[in-house]
Image (cartoon, rainbow, N blue to C red):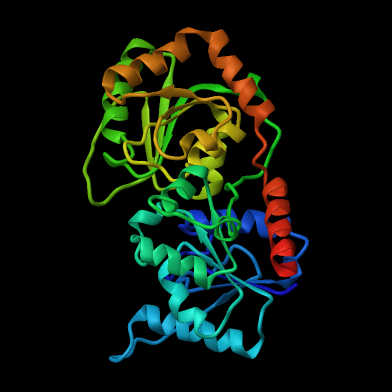
């Protein structure tokens, strides 16, 4: 089975500042039974790529075409020369209309809220996507629920929809080597709850001087500055560094205000044996098997949640053990689910 995967334009399929979709795809493609038959197409400015399955679509700016139109034209030209059994489009519903004029084997993957995305906001647009694709796959039940908002579908249309979560690799973690460290990873903005985290963590570090906190991420559009002798703000770091920090940390905080479609950091923290604190937003609960959930985010509730895990060692270690024991969203598991959907789709 020959499979083509089309990334969003400007998604970096590179170890240098990789997109979340690229990290996910790189992990599952290497485990797929079709890995030698998969080609990923994108437009990455960095020379170093995550793997050799990738082909860069180099496009030139013209007065008559947008970058997106040129990008799709370049892909169509490549695909028409060597057609695939399936074409998987990631997180760009607006690509479907253009591609459906040439191909009828399209599969759309949603990684974000469909209601917020161009060409997927209205009922008419979502019905159009159903009519022009073989399958639509969502990264969480929450994302699928959003797609279904105000839709009255037939059984046949519902059968086109499937949830396949994101995944990560599973590694051996020694909980005895965990440090007294609380980690926050992501955009340092209010949507991610970094303002609440910052104010809460300063109070925690004042109370527990044998604990430290590590922050990984950046945000050029907002300036939220917090300083403490036990607070290490690393800025943006590569994925390997982030996974290593999660492996060494005891607690991970994912305190988003916005409705997270899934929550990759929560997923990776769980896989690395952290006690994970999350807000009750979007699909975050689907990314973690045994989280501590904050239903109403503010400085008091977040402080109390972190304080509870630090002061109650048995609870913290119990959540860490459960994170490792119950973690199942491995690259192997999800890759098999994707291969199964591919085989069933081709047969239908």
Q: Residue at x 58, y 86 (%)?
A: 78
40 relative to 150, above or below: below
**Quarter where residue 225 is shown:** top left
Along the line of sight, the residue nearer the viewer: 336 or 158: 158
Residue 313 in the image, given as x and y percentages of width and height: 54, 9
303 relative to 165, above or below: above
Q: Quadrant of the N terminus?
A: bottom right
Residue found at the very far right of the displayed protein: 33
Q: Residue at x 65, y 19 (%)?
A: 176
Is residue 6 visible from the viewing direction of this image? yes
Is 297 left, or right, of 275 in this rendering? left
Is 17 left, or right, of 324 in this rendering? left
Along the line of sight, the residue nearer the viewer: 319 or 223: 319
Q: Residue at x 35, y 45 (%)?
A: 187
111 relative to 199, above or below: below
Residue 336 in the image, given as x and y percentages of width and height: 73, 52
Residue 136 in the image, given as x and y percentages of width and height: 55, 60
Q: Quadrant of the C terminus?
A: bottom right
Residue 268 in the image, given as x and y percentages of width and height: 56, 39
Along the line of sight, the residue nearer the viewer: 238 or 87: 87
């Amino acid at each position: 089975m020959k499979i083509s995967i089309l990334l969003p334009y400007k998604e970096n399929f590179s170890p240098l500042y990789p997109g979340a979709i690229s990290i996910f795809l790189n992990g599952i493609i290497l485990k797929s039974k079709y890995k030698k038959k998969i080609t990923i197409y994108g437009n990455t400015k960095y020379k170093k790529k995550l793997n050799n399955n990738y082909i860069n679509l180099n496009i030139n700016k013209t007065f008559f075409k947008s970058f997106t139109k040129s990008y799709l034209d370049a892909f169509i030209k490549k695909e028409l020369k060597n057609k695939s059994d399936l074409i998987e489009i990631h997180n760009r519903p607006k690509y479907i209309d253009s591609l459906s004029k040439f191909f009828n084997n399209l599969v759309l993957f949603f990684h974000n809220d469909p209601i917020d995305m161009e060409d997927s906001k209205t009922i008419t647009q979502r019905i159009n996507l159903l009519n022009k694709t073989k399958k639509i796959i969502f990264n969480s039940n929450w994302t699928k629920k959003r797609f279904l908002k105000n839709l009255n579908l037939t059984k046949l249309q519902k059968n086109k929809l499937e949830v396949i979560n994101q995944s990560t690799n599973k590694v051996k973690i020694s909980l005895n080597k965990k440090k007294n460290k609380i980690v926050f990873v992501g955009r340092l903005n209010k949507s991610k709850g970094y303002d609440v985290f910052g104010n809460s963590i300063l109070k925690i570090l004042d109370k527990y001087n044998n604990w430290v906190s590590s922050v990984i991420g950046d945000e050029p559009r907002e300036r939220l500055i917090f300083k403490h002798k036990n607070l290490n703000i690393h800025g943006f770091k590569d994925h390997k560094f982030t996974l290593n920090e999660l492996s060494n940390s005891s607690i991970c905080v994912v305190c988003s205000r916005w409705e997270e479609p899934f929550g990759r950091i929560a997923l990776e923290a769980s896989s690395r044996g952290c006690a994970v604190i999350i807000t009750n937003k979007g699909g975050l609960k689907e990314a973690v098997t045994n989280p501590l959930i904050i239903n109403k985010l503010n400085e008091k509730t977040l402080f109390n949640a972190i304080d509870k895990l630090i002061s109650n060692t048995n609870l913290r270690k119990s959540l860490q053990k459960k994170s490792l024991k119950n973690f199942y969203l491995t690259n192997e598991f999800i890759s098999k689910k994707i291969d199964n959907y591919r085989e069933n789709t081709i047969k239908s």
